[in-house]
Amino acid sequence: MQNFKINSLEEYNQAYQKSIENPSKFWAEIAENFLWRKKWHTVLKYDWSKPETKWFIGGKLNITENCLDRHLKTRGDKTAIIWEPNNPSEKAQHISYKQLHSKVCQFANVLKASNVGKGDRVCIYMPMVVELAVAVLACARIGAIHSVVFAGFSATALAARINDASCKILLTTDGVYRGSKLVALKDIADEALKVCPSIEKSIVYQNTKQKVDWNEKDVWWHDELKKVDDNCPAEEMDAEDMLFILYTSGSTGKPKGMVHTCGGYMVYAAYTFQNVFQYQENDVYWCTADIGWVTGHSYIIYGPLACGATTVMFEGIPSYPDYGRFWEVCEKHKVNQFYTAPTAIRALAKHPTTLVEKYNLSSLKVLGTVGEPINEEAWHWYDENVGKKNCPIVDTWWQTETGGMMMTSLAGITGQKPAFATLPFVGIQPSLLDDKGNELTEDAAEGILAINFPWPSLARTIYGDHERYKNVYFSAYENKYFPGDGALRDENGNYRITGRVDDVVIVSGHNLGTAPIENAIDEHKDIVECAVVGFPHDVKGNALCAYVTTYDNVQESDNLIAEVREIVSKTIGPIAKPDKIIFVSGLPKTRSGKIMRRILRKIASNDTSNLGDISTLLNPDVVQEIIENFK
Ligand code: WT7
């Protein structure tokens, strides 16, 4: 629990006002609540033409002292992490702050003994076991930069991320439990490591005890632990030193390694956590995300632990052993705040409500959503069946790049409106722009979303490519951060996020660039070219449709469809597999050869009423053919 809780609408308004009028003073006061080895001399310096943003300049700290050490006296025996296994017949684990501190320090010593030091990159490719959280914090303890890669990614995707950051060490597991399935994770990691020369050692946590191949660089996690103790003083970090890299998709093939730094990220993650969820000491908080995504970084690990909270880590999936699992876990651990994705809500809403009613959900106080727009129907299902109309819902809009929540209500403090992320969080100054970049000043308006002023947890760069960082986020509109989303605002200042305005599609809450998927499909020997677009899907929010042209002599078959799906799965991961694959003789192109994805998106959405002027296309005839083939 931090001393910066907002307790009323009036306090929110005051805090917001102050954060806008005097951001430096405001954030300095919030930052005072943390443990600093040395205080900053300047709160904020920024120049978005470079772009450069620095917070708490001169400040020294270690985030793990804030997440662990500082709690030992006051809540050492309090549960930090409740770990709930994939298999409900296995026992849950309760790890106290003391125990977590000890595990983190011990594993930090393993990393040190493996020649990992401040600034070295460590790739973490692990499922939702306690050791994943331990690994993340152990890196932070010694100032190594963690790069967590979601354990559902393919070998190719993993290798690309390891190589982009020249990671020195890989942390992985033998296998993964996923519902009734067993995934051979180490096999995938082994495949990746064939092309990752920077990796010196792979430390393997024994999770499933399945048989694995053993290579020269492999060592067992448990063997390494035996060689070290749990005494590991934290490395002193500068506020602006890198804390982690986390990859997100972009509109070009290469994933973007978003860089977050120690000071600002910590302050903002904790401040948003405490206030958005209105967390109180002894509450049990559960975010169902995977730590492989930013939601897990900020709101399973860093935000909750910096506030001394009890955070649930769930190894399983919502549908195993049945679609009542989430609610079973809520009842079992008496969860007070529950944070999940709209896609999960929609999937659960397809099943009988008896699966919810079976469980006692009276502990729930606050519900949250993240990752994509939530439709009104799903919102009401969540509100009525899970919240029993008695729990505020926080719809939190933010991004890997923003590090923490940007637009959201504060549970029970500010108002809610179905399908609206509602108000900017304290310190956030949004604006809506027209196509030309002019600010829309009317109260109610719809346009492109931009952020006018820095906040502490903004990603500082793209690892190794500051130019791209500048181009993607700071070049569209002068002196503004461009998130790539569209939004509308009602007359009361509530924002509704309408979706991406670039070539990124949010599928089941996962941010997928269409370009890397197209590149993967184009690799198939029978395929000339393709275009991938998103279309609305009732469970996933969006699904992918690939329009594919083949060489003349190629037979368009179910086999080929399966191969296309497989190549995507292998190159990127199963989540990126297109739902629909449509063979066409050509793609609609402008005279300069640019694929008109707008038209393809409309066709995929079954909306061919207004395709706009297609006469300017290089090949207008192809459009009718595509419409026919689509049916
Ligand atoms: C994109 C960012 C934030 C952590 C998980 C996703 C979409 C996210 C919402 C929301 C509408 C949302 C946006 C955003 N998005 N939350 N509450 N309402 N859209 O992080 O993978 O970086 O994706 O997710 O389009 O730009 P990410």
Image (cartoon, grey):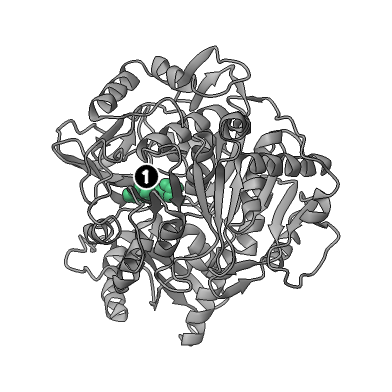
Which image quarter: residue 596? bottom left
The number of numbered discs placed on residues in the rendered structure image is 1
Residue sitting nearer the eye, 517 or 100: 100
Q: Is residue 544 above or below residue 77?
A: below
Residue sitting nearer the eye, 90 or 415: 90
Position of residue 427 in the picture relative to residue 400 (left or right): left
At x 50% / y 51%, what residue is drawn? 312
Q: Quadrant of the C terminus?
A: bottom left
Residue 257 visible in the displayed image: no
- Is label 1 in a helix, a strand or a loop? loop
Q: Is residue 38 above or below residue 318?
A: above
For badge 1, the amino acid type reads Gly
Which image quarter: residue 229? top right
Residue sitting nearer the eye, 426 or 463: 426
**Furthest-top residue in view?**
41
At x 44% / y 37%, what residue is drawn? 281
Q: Is residue 222 above or below residue 294?
A: below
Position of residue 547 in the picture relative to residue 204 (left or right): left
Residue 604 visible in the displayed image: yes
Position of residue 27 in the picture relative to residue 302 (left or right): left
x then y, percent, for residue 540: 36, 65
Q: Is residue 414 above or below residue 86?
A: above
Residue sitting nearer the eye, 601 or 181: 181
At x 58% / y 51%, what residue is drawn? 94
Label 1, residues with CA under 10 Å away: few <14, some 14-19, many ≥20: some
Which image quarter: residue 109? top right
x then y, percent, for residue 357: 30, 67
- Label 1 beta carbon within 8 A of ligand 1: yes
x then y, percent, for residue 342: 34, 58
| Residue matched to label 1 | 484
x then y, percent, for residue 221: 77, 54
